[in-house]
Amino acid sequence: MDIVCIVCPKSCRITAAPGNPPVITGNSCKRGYQFALDELTAPKRTVCTTVRTVFPDAPVLPVKTSAEIPKDRIFDLMREINAFTLETRVGTGEAVIPDALGLGADVIATSDLLKETIPEGENDR
Amino acid sequence: MNIKKINKKLQKAFGGKFTAVYENGAVSVRGESGDWGEIVSACMAAATKNSTTHVVNDAVFTGAVPEEMRLPAITDSALDGKSPDVLIIGGGISGASIARELTKWKLDVLLIEKEADLALGASGRNDGEVHPGVDLGKGSLKHKYVRRGNRMYGDVCRELNVGFRRVGQYVGFLNGALRPLIGAYCLLRKYRDGIEDTEIISGKELHRREPNLNHAFKFAISNPSTGCVCPYGLTIAYAENAVQNGARVSLSTAALGMDVQNGEILSVCTNRGTVYPRLVINAAGVFAEEIAKMADDRFYSIHPRRGTNSILDKKAGVYMHSVSSVKELPAHDKSHSKGGGILHTVHDNLLVGPDAVETYEKENYATNADSIKTVFDKQTVSMPGLSKSDIITYFTGVRAPTFEEDFIIEKGRRTKNLIHCAGIQSPGLTTAPAVALDIEKMAVEMLSENSPVEKNEAFDPIRKGVPVLRDMPDDERAEMIRQNPDYGVIVCRCEEVSKGEILDALRSPICVPTVDGVKKRVRPGMGRCQGGFCSPLVVKIIAEFLGVPPEDVRKSADSAVITYGKTKGGADDETV
Amino acid sequence: MKPYDVIVIGGGPAGLAAAVSANDSGAAVCLIERENRLGGILKQCIHDGFGLLRFGARLTGPEYAQRYINEVRARDIDVFTETFVTKTESDGGGFVIHAVNRSGVTVLSANALVLATGCRERTAKQVFIHGTRPAGVFTAGTAQHFTNLMGLQPANNCVILGSGDIGLIMARRLTLEGAKVLGVYEAKPTPSGLTRNLHQCLYDYGIPLYLSKTVTRVFGEDRVTGVEISAVDDAMRPVPGTEEYVACDTLILSVGLIPENEIAEALGVKLDDRTKGPVCDGQFMTNVDGVFSCGNALHVNDLVDYVSENAAIAGKNAANYKKAPRKLLELQADASLLYLVPQTLDLNRDNSKTTLFFRSKEPLDGASLKIYADGNEVLGKRYAFLRPPEMETLTLDFERFGLTENSRVTFKIVPKAQEG
């Protein structure tokens, strides 16, 4: 199978054939090897999106999965995220939805937006 | 006007396809064609210059089914039972200026406009040139009003706080041999037609004044009284001043029908209720003929003619500071609409255009690549450095000429409580201030027949517009910001528009809380990024001002949805 | 009026990096940002893939920006947010900046300026799309602002014109938010965005990419109801007779970025026709002494990592700037290069570690970048592939070429096939 590596902007064109061990050529780093291996068996992606918040100054907060999740669960995760509303002013790296869908990855905040713009009179947390 | 002669002419040109009949005091052209251009030609052939007997187009166009007039979506009874002294139909430059002049009198003035804002027809879609009138034939109403209107501009724009500059116009000639002929023409215009300041200047002088115009120009006509104005800005200003002085403006309001009995309009049915005016003024632009028909007073026809203008980046604004065009003789260009040149706008962009194309569609404002090409091909003769890559936007307008190519400014012929202000095309922007005064007089005379009309002593001609901070010196600007810190928050980077100015526009006498409404009033989104950066911010400011969610803010009309609600699958499953 | 050594205009990734590096070089630095938060466009670029070169980590835009914002905050740098520069003037060797914000009009002065003003998106009219003017035509960045910062859905059924990275990213983003992306249309015969973005943004979601096709017309009175697609010829002109109608409610444009250099131009900075950014020397100083340029205002980068890199160089050089005579030598890039930055070298300065950025005009598999000094090949660097969307960078020691003011330095890309 021909794969374009998405790990870095180099976009290496990798050829991967199943087997024991699989035959992987064209990668220029270890991460590329791992990516191709995953693509062969169980493709995974990091999901970057936003979550709804209760704060009018920032109606949505950017988030991502702390680790890659199976590609075929992306829309399941989006449904989970869409049903969620953030009520605390979390900062970058803090978990918003821990272990989402039980996949072993947290949905974490990727912005300090909510920490920066606390309106007067509102207590933090 | 001789109907036999006309029929002979039609027979010769169209072989019996069209005939003319004298009916109801007008020349009715009949026949059938699938070619709109042919119908227009036939009606033009039947028209007599400067005649008060007009051509009415009764020919059947089989080429396409024209779209129905766009109507507002709203239906309510906001105006039901109102009985204004004067009902003005149409919120363009004509309607708005007439409304303002009428508020000098103690009259109940109601202006209705079918669109969601003013100046959405030809008044908002033209080049903003204030014409000198040098090329208008004597005997026409255009000629009668153009000099008066031109002279009024300085005062009117000062009163209404609208930007206006007399930038001057140059009509360049490549053929030096024409100079004696054109010189004689200018003298004739000057002394016979009263265009006092027109003169011939040498090619050398032209290049001194405008170094980027074609160096091959041998000489030019110079018309220093030519000016530029923001046409929709002036329309809005007129209407705002009218409202300040007691007039009512009802947007998204269309005249749908009239009850006319014994030559009198008893009521006008609108989508917002039935109105019972004493006097109706038809200033409906391309739809003036439809209104005339409703009023049982149709004695002219409008044949729409579209034109496209391009706006160039302010960076190109420095290439030229006036209005310029090129003239070639003999003229290939037989068009009746003026314009067609390069114009330094009052906002310091360059504007290039327009062209002139006959169309059966009164509201098709779509642009076409051909129009831009035609205009640029022509205007690069004037200014060889003109580049399409400087274009930031382009737009199409539709003019509303009659087949006589002159204005119709008169009382109804069969219907007595009606005034027509129709057939208004270029130089209609220039003439509007003068025409409005005459219509004011006409209206007051007509209304005085029943009971005396009193002067409105409280009339204030001064409109305080939204301050333009980018034009202020630092100390003045700092003082404004001290009074209102929102003036210090720049929302539109291209045009340097502050949040304070946007909020001022929303608080103005005629609030149009849409992205386009704000854009027309204080210019966010008019610059080189065309709202790319500021439109989300403007949406947010409007939403906060109105106290509605941002997804409820529209671009223009009610169905001009910008966003389809919240992400995350909408607000339905919101848990808060 | 407090004099600074360096004023940085623009608080996006370039401005942040320039301010940090200028401060680290000992300068008193002021950073001016027109928005209310630092970070520039990265604030809305919530996808990951930033920072692999710079931090060896796959960061999202806000995370990448936050690292630099933290660096700025940790230093004694005066930061003005929601502050807009209205006027810049040269003033006897230094510069005076007039800016407005909620407190009024501020006048600041500095010995050197770093212009980190970023870029803007090309609009529908600038690519000559005709038809009506309804709501629902957005540049990708505007759609991204609505979606990622305001939590608003700009599209239900959309067509994307242009395969630039932001367009591809938005195709995925809108798909995740439940919109249907009907296709991405690209007038060029090759995609404009990074290859990995074609894969992870389009192919992962089954979004079709159509090459050599463009949008020629928009339909709809109030909101978009459809677009007309036309095939284009080799010169990218629409071919009459190939029009097809696609019903949609949204047209999103990702048709190129234009460096924003209005402030630069007002100062008399000369722009390069190819980059649309300033002509600069190896220190990223423009033709105007004391005015430096970096980031996407200098030329449109495809990776923020490069933006930070060249901004840091500009910031450092601005901090060390002293007016001195310059001996400028033009670096001539022939037509095989889309562009080359810097365009000149100041031979009075140290050019032993000069960073170059270039793009190939054509997509090539196997090619060499060759540099000639007075006709002699002084450098030949091989590349496995060169693609116009993928910028290349290298650092060179020009001192060893023994250049003089009269030297002729030319750059050329030679395809493998012609190398022999």
Image (spheres, coloured by chain):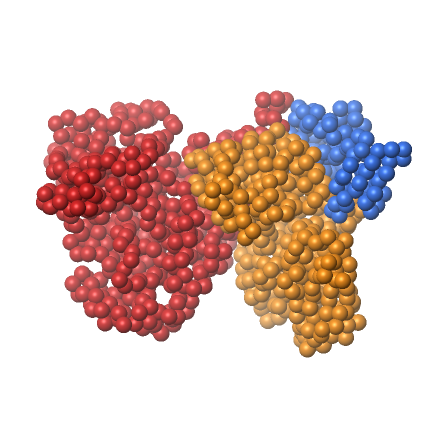
Give how far across and how far down residue A26 sits, in percent. 81, 45
Task: Out of B462 and B102, give the one closest to the viewer.
Answer: B102
- Tell me if I can see residue B44 in this picture: yes
User: B440 or B63, which lies in front?
Assistant: B63
Q: Colour of chain A?
A: blue
Q: Quadrant of residue B275?
A: top left
Instruction: Give the side of residue A39 with respect to residue C33, left or right.
Output: right
Along the horizontal axis of the image, is C281 left or right of B314?
right
Q: Could you tell me which residue is drawn at 54 percent across and 53 percent down?
A: C235
Tell me what residue is drawn at x 80 percent, y 46 percent.
Answer: C56
Q: Is residue B441 visible?
A: no
Chain that is red in the image:
B
Quarter where residue B574 is shown: top right
C256, B542: nearer the viewer: C256
Task: Where is residue C92? Give x, y as percent.
Answer: 59, 71
Where the C terminus of chain B falls, by quadrant?
top right
View extreme (right): residue: A20
| Chain C, hue in figure | orange
Q: Indicate whether B139 appears above or below B113.
A: below
Circle count: 0
> Is B431 above or below relative to B114?
below
Residue C49 % position (x, y): 73, 43
Q: What residue is drawn where x is 31% and y is 36%?
A: B63
Name the residue at 43% across, 64% down. B384
Q: Is residue B367 left or right of residue C155?
A: left
Image vertical order of residue C83 relative to residue A114, above or below: below
